[in-house]
Image (cartoon, rainbow, N blue to C red):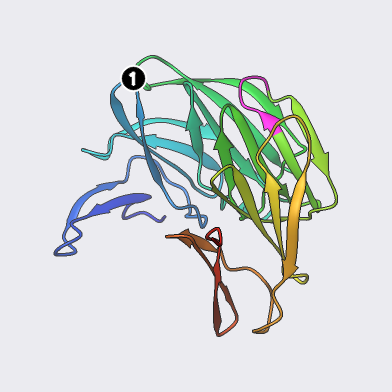
Amino acid sequence: GGTEGVVVALNKMTGETVWAMKEFQDRASYCSPVIIAHNGRRLLLTMTAANILCLDPATGALLWNHPHRTEYDINAVSPVYGDGILYCSSGYKSGGVALKLSDDGASVTEAWTDKTLDCQHHGVVLLGGYIYGGAHRNSFVCLELATGKVMWTTEEVRQGVVEYADGMLYIYEGPKRGIVHLVKAAPEGFERAGMFTVTEGDGNHWAHPAIANGVLYIRHGDVLLAYNLRATP
């Protein structure tokens, strides 16, 4: 964000600036950039306060921008990509948009928009052509990537951070409840396999969990918890 570079690339060993994209002006907005491969071409994608941006990660050249406004200018969910389609979602009832990339990735056309899944900051999972994510309006949603069709929605799980492992969705529901849900990743319908409540720590349940080597890690306040997910013999 700012006049010295809306997006910048740094040498991770030295901190030296490799490039700074200044040709487009906007404020930063919490979104971590991602790099995808589209028809063999690497593209850097991110969201600023009011736009979706696509850059050449080697040079920082701006390839395109697509307006995406939301209340408070908060776009905090990293884009996801599959089958030539880029999906971006934001909270505060703004919802999501799917952009169809050109063959070379240098331009996009809007494929569809959706208001059901307005993901605030919790991230979404794209799996097998379907998007799973928590809506700011306190529900959990499954969308079809190609069409934007709502496959199912449930209020049994409210907005929460979603992670995927071994065919299952691990959803850490916040900000007040702290419930972890185990949900089958299936577009046919909502199916919960289990749940438990995080009781240690204090404050809102905002942190994003991580899964590594069969262990689920959750931070709540100043407490870090580790849950063994491995099958018992």
Q: Which residue is mark 1?
A: 39
Left or right: where 85 falls relative to 45: right
Where residue 51 appears, as percent x and y from the top left, is: 52, 40
149 in the magenta segment: no
Q: Quadrant of residue 56?
A: top left
Left or right placement of residue 18 versus residue 46 in this view: left
Segment colored magenta: 143-147
Residue 155 position in % (x across, y down): 85, 49
Q: Residue at x 76, y 49 (%)?
A: 192
Across and down, in percent, residue 63 comes to: 35, 29
Question: Which residue does the image show at 62% across and 55% down from the upper left?
Answer: 122
- Above or below — where is 56 with respect to 231? above
Q: 25 and 120: which one is in front?
A: 120
- Check the image and name the residue furthest to the front: 233
41, above or below 92, in the image: above
Residue 68 appearing in the image? no
Give the vertical position of 52 relative to 196 (above or below): above
Name the quarter where the N terminus is drawn.
bottom left
Quadrant of the snapshot with the C terminus:
bottom right
Amino acid on which the number 1 mark rests in the picture? Asn
Q: Nearer the viewer, residue 39 or 29?
A: 39
